[in-house]
Image (cartoon, rainbow, N blue to C red):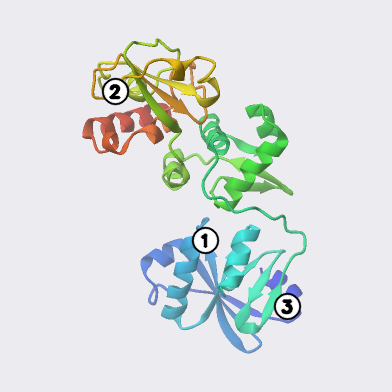
Amino acid sequence: MKDFLEKRLGIEIMLEDINFEDRLPLLYISLYTFKLVQTYGVEWIIIIPKEQVHLSKLRKQHKQIEKLLNLHCAFYLRAGNLYSINTMISEGIPFFIENREIYLPFLGILLQANSEREIKPIQRLSYLCQKLILTAIYEDWNEINVSKTAEKLEITKMSASRCFDEIEFLEMPILGLKGRSRVINIPEDKKTLWEDLKNFMRTPVISTFYFADDLQLPIKGGMSALAEYSNIEDNAYPSYIVAKKDMNRLGIKNRPISGKIDMPGSMVQELGYMLFYKAGNIMDPLSLQLSLSEEEKEDYRIGKAVKEMLEEYVW
């Protein structure tokens, strides 16, 4: 770090570890380490995240730390995409990325790399990217690059690269580098990882249909799937899942639909993606959790069954 800064800034700097346990809340002490820097006769602080911290937290915490320390502070980041870099520059948040950008506005310094790949902002995760992430979790991916991802999911390299862009834009803690290639790495603690990731996820359910008869489809979803994974009882009618692309082929939408207030013969959920799990005749556990309605999530019995399912089949 010292060598990098001196080479890029063209001056000698003084750098030393410093402890702020007496001046900062324990939250910040647990999230960051700190170094005191002297440059051009100015003292300032380098804030080093102990683990990846999302951009929204960096923006908020930077102001609070500077106010508490009454010193200029710059984040040291191990990685950063074009969107996050431009956002921090536009908001005046000092930072540097080793071997790349340096932005120290309190010293009047902005040094940028010229070879950045632009990543388009996204509003929400695509179904394909969500399928990729869940597959990586189930299969314990380690150093899986774009080419290998395309092979595993049987998609084009361009589609896989777009998924990697989504993961990078959202700064998900599963993206790493091997040489110059982006790779997916799933940590051993999947439970903690899922707590970090699930807020980015979306329900896979596009539409729900109720029918007067039992369609006897091959893949169970909803409460029927949860009953397979746990000790909870199924509804009086079976629940099935069908991929959007298969709805017309199976003639699902051409069948007479029954209102939910009647006792249906079966329920069918149209999904944005299908992820074949284990034997392939049941919805995967994480997608199942994401598919639950708000009403179902508030049911204690269902919550207990979901916890039982995840402990048994995922963590």
Lower sequence index among marks 3 and 1: 3
The C terminus appears in which quarter of the rendering?
A: top left
Q: Position of residue 258 (x, y in %)?
A: 31, 19
Relative placement, left or right, of 263 versus 29 is left
Q: Position of residue 144 (x, y in %)?
A: 65, 37
Above or below, 96 against 144 in this view is: below
Relative placement, left or right, of 67 versus 184 is left
The residue mark sitting in front, 2 or 1, is 2
The residue tagged with tag 2: helix, strand or loop? loop
Please name the residue that numbered disc 3 is placed on.
9
Mark 2 neighbour class, 10 Å CA radius: few under 14, some 14 to 19, many 20 or more: few
Lower sequence index among marks 2 and 3: 3
User: Disc 2 to disc 3, how far (Cα)?
Assistant: 69 Å
Above or below, 85 against 315 in this view is: below
Question: Relative to the observer, which residue lies in front, 283 or 294?
Answer: 294
Q: Position of residue 78 (x, y in %)?
A: 62, 59
User: Disc 2 to disc 1, how far (Cα)?
Assistant: 45 Å
Please name the residue that numbered disc 1 is placed on.
55
Please name the residue that numbered disc 2 is placed on.
259
The residue mark sitting in front, 2 or 3, is 2
Mark 3 neighbour class, 10 Å CA radius: few under 14, some 14 to 19, many 20 or more: some
Q: Are marks 2 and 3 in contact (CB under 8 Å)?
A: no
